[in-house]
Amino acid sequence: MDEIYTRLNAVFREIFDDDRIIVTPDLTAEDISEWDSLNHIRLMLAVQKTFGAKFAAAEISNLKNVADLVKLIQAKSVAA
């Protein structure tokens, strides 16, 4: 699971252009000021590409924090 967080950290830092971001299980969109609807789409596309996963819109809309995203990655990914 640490590898997932390490890879997510790189994705978050790239999408939000902030090398200070540290991805934790309880991280939410409220914690990153640049995390708007457009960056959310960019983030989800980058995560899907990074992990070789496909998420349904309903699955994405149900995510509450990064811990939920990690669970979804684990369930859907071929590269987790």
Image: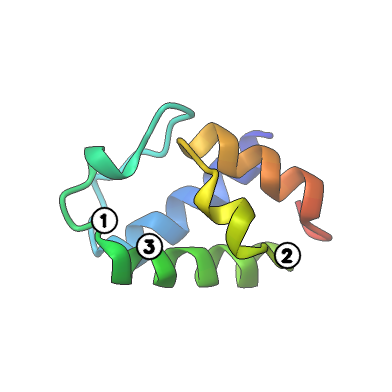
Distance between the alpha carbons at the discs numbered 2 and 1: 21 Å
Given residues 21 and 43, the one toward you in this image is 43
Q: Secondary structure at mark 3?
A: helix
Q: Position of residue 26 (x, y in %)?
A: 42, 27
Q: Secondary structure at mark 1?
A: loop
Left or right, 39 with reference to 34: right
Q: Position of residue 36 (x, y in %)?
A: 24, 60
Which of the marked residues, 1 or 3, is nearer the chain's N terminus?
Answer: 1
Q: Name above or below for residue 18 compared with residue 29.
A: below
| Residue sitting at x 53%, y 72% | 45
Which of the marked residues, 2 or 3, is nearer the chain's N terminus?
Answer: 3
Residue at the spot of label 1: 35
- Quick one: label 2, few (<14), some, or many (20+) residues within 10 Å? some
Distance between the alpha carbons at the discs numbered 1 and 3: 6 Å
Left or right, 54 with reference to 30: right
Mark 1 and 3 residues: CB-CB less than 8 Å, in contact? Answer: yes
Query: Given the image, on which type of amino acid does mark 1 rest?
Result: Trp
Residue at the spot of label 2: 53
- Quick one: label 1, few (<14), some, or many (20+) residues within 10 Å? some
Q: Position of residue 77 (x, y in %)?
A: 78, 57
Which of the marked residues, 2 or 1, is nearer the chain's N terminus?
Answer: 1
Image mark for residue 40:
3
Query: Given the image, on which type of amino acid does mark 2 rest?
Result: Ala
Q: Name above or below for residue 80 compared with residue 11.
A: above
| Residue sitting at x 67%, y 63% | 56
Q: Residue furthest front?
A: 58
